Image (cartoon, rainbow, N blue to C red):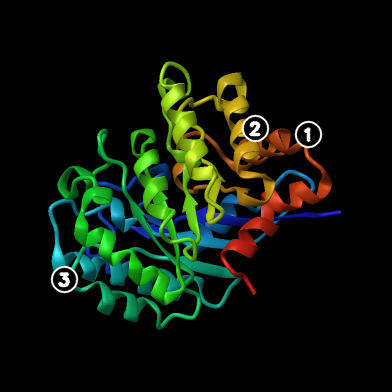
């Protein structure tokens, strides 16, 4: 019996000169030195899945919130909108949903959200918030959890009935949990196991688990089990990472966790489908058949309202 893989976190992008996709070739990677990673490339990456998996669709997640450091205002928003339009044109029709980005801290937020909302496949917004250590834009924006305009802008997600995807660092978990507790109506999806380093899971484990526990205690949070090469490029052989995954699942419960490819990033880091998906299946072995369906498809379909 086939096990559906509805992939709730993948990217496509165009880094060719003169692109109208909003992407930043100075920041985003070129998988196999190809400037274009399109729908056909993504779907080809998941053609040869191990038995019993079958790719059935997924959720495209933005890349522009890591791009264009130094830009603010309408010029930055133009890239956010260009990316969403470019991607929608390539994933429509098809079994895909969209999570673009916009700067919640900017004055033009309502206008940008209104333009995003014109696409019926819109389900949420993502921003990369990792600060200290900074991801590319965050050295410029600072810690947005402490930005009054960003905190006010977040209310618009509740008004628009959108979810919020984010990346953040373990040193931000506590403040994130305190903030998101004020918005129980907004589904919050934590990307990539909370982007821990191996140090965060070992010498820094007290901070990681305290904060992760606070996030998991919120009923509106979910977490993606993905980008596990970030703490260890050979994570499937590291019991620290594997044990952390199972402990996170225990904190959030099976129904609030899902596996994702994070392609083309994980692909470029040496995790083709022939390696990544068997590793996920190995993690899922100890769980029931129904729980495995949740990890690979049903949980993400429910959270992202796939119809």
Question: What whole-number distance in Å separates the C-alpha atoms at marks 2 and 3?
Answer: 43 Å
Q: Name the residue under label 1.
A: 286
Answer with mark 1 or mark 3, whichever residue precedes in sequence.
Answer: 3
From the viewer's perspective, is 223 left or right of 249? Answer: left
State how many labels appear. 3
Residue 255 in view: yes
Q: Name the residue under label 2.
A: 246
Answer with mark 1 or mark 2, whichever residue precedes in sequence.
Answer: 2
In the foreground, 135 or 220: 220
Q: What element carries label 3?
A: helix
**Quadrant holding the N terminus:** bottom right
Mark 1 or 3, closer to the camera: 1
Residue 48 in view: no
Whether tag 1 and tag 2 are in contact, CB under 8 A, the answer is yes
Residue 22 in the image, given as x and y percentages of width and height = 27, 64
From the viewer's perspective, is 291 left or right of 111? Answer: right
Residue shown at the point (15%, 47%) measured from the top left: 140
Q: In which quarter of the image is residue 236?
A: top right
Within-10-Å neighbours for mark 1: few <14, some 14–19, many 20+: few
Within-10-Å neighbours for mark 2: few <14, some 14–19, many 20+: some
Q: In the image, is residue 281 above or below residue 260? A: above
From the viewer's perspective, is 189 left or right of 296? Answer: left
Question: What whole-number distance in Å separates the C-alpha atoms at marks 1 and 3?
Answer: 49 Å
Residue shown at the point (81%, 54%) measured from the top left: 2
Q: Is mark 1 on a helix, strand or loop?
A: loop
Answer with mark 2 or mark 3, whichever residue precedes in sequence.
Answer: 3
């Amino acid at each position: 019996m086939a096990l559906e893989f509805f992939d709730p976190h993948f990217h496509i992008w165009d880094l060719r000169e003169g692109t109208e996709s909003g992407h930043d070739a100075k920041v985003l990677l070129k998988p196999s030195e190809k400037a274009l990673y399109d729908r056909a490339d993504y779907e080809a990456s998941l053609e040869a899945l191990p038995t019993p998996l079958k790719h059935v669709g997924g959720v495209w997640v933005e890349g522009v919130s890591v791009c264009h450091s130094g830009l603010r205002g309408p010029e930055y928003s133009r890239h956010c909108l260009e990316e969403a339009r470019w991607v929608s044109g390539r994933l429509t029709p098809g079994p895909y949903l969209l999570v673009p980005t916009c700067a919640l801290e900017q004055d033009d937020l309502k206008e940008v959200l209104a333009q995003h909302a014109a696409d019926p496949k819109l389900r949420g917004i993502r921003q990369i918030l990792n600060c200290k250590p900074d991801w590319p834009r965050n050295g410029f924006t600072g810690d947005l959890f402490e930005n009054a305009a960003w905190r006010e802008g977040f209310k618009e997600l509740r008004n628009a009935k959108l979810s919020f995807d984010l990346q953040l660092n373990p040193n931000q978990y506590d403040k994130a949990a305190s903030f998101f507790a004020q918005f129980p109506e907004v589904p919050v999806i934590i990307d990539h196991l909370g982007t821990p380093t191996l140090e965060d899971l070992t010498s820094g484990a007290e901070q990681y688990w305290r904060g992760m526990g606070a996030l998991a205690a919120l009923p509106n949070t979910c977490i993606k089990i993905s980008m596990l090469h970030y703490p260890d490029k050979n994570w499937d052989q590291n019991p620290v990472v594997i044990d952390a995954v199972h402990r996170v699942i225990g904190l959030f419960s099976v129904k609030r966790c899902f596996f994702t490819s994070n392609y083309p990033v994980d692909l470029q880091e040496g995790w083709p489908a022939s390696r990544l998906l068997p590793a996920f299946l190995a993690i899922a072995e100890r769980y029931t058949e129904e729980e495995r369906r949740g990890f690979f498809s049903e949980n993400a379909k429910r959270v992202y309202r796939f119809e």
